[in-house]
Amino acid sequence: MRELANIRQLYKPIQPTVKQSARHVSYVEFLPDLRLQNYIYCYWQLQTSQALNEPFHYRVVADGCIDIFFELTDPADSYVMGFCKRYTEFPLENEFNYVGIRFLPTMFPQLFRVNAGEREAEISFLLPEHPSQQPLFHKPFTGQGMFLTIEVDNVDKLYKDLKKKGAEIKIELRDEPWGDRHFAIVDPNGIGIDLVTYAPAEQK
């Protein structure tokens, strides 16, 4: 495995300071063991000290890193957040305790032997109990708070096409200050789908 011993000195991923409901939300980073510092930038924890009055929106800027994180009170609520090119916002509940590992750039695929350039992904949205599918795929999704963001080349065209087909639009087509032009629908299992075309704000 190729080690980049000086990457920590050359690169410092920084996430926004938690400002919303700051009195009751804390974000802390912990330095890993010296032997892991060529691979892991930090361990981190994002948690509430008491229930908030409203759901919390956690804002993440693109930093070139890949994170593994999970909810301490619900181990099933675990994720790998891959490399992204733009600002992202995660809607959370009003109580949470997330812990994570932030890998330095290029380290995650080397440690886990994942080459994104050699892999393809497919996302399917299925009606529960559909007769064309095997029993494994019949059960409906019963969780809450999950959504997918899919970046597309022309969000305006996709919006018009789905409207013509009678799709129910949950969030109408709109522009965001950070560069997103997007709209949202809901799949048959209740999962929110955010469809977006991104351009830096100054180019819009």
Image (tube, rainbow, N blue to C red):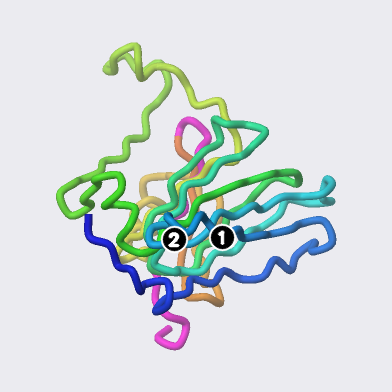
Residue 123 position in % (x across, y down): 31, 40
* Residue indicated by mark 1: 31
- In the picture, measured across the screen, residue 79 lies left or right of residue 20, that is left
* Residue indicated by mark 2: 37
Residue 128 position in % (x across, y down): 43, 21
Q: Residue at x 40, y 25 (%)?
A: 127
Q: Residue at x 76, y 57 (%)?
A: 25
Residue 178 position in % (x across, y down): 52, 75
Q: Is residue 112 above or below residue 8?
A: above
Residue 22 falls inside the magenta stretch = no
Hey, what amino acid is under mark 1? Leu
Callout 1: SS: loop
Q: Residue at x 62, y 31 (%)?
A: 74
Residue 195 falls inside the magenta stretch = yes
Q: Earlier in the sequence, mark 1 or mark 2?
A: 1
Q: Do labels 1 and 2 touch, CB within 8 Å?
A: yes
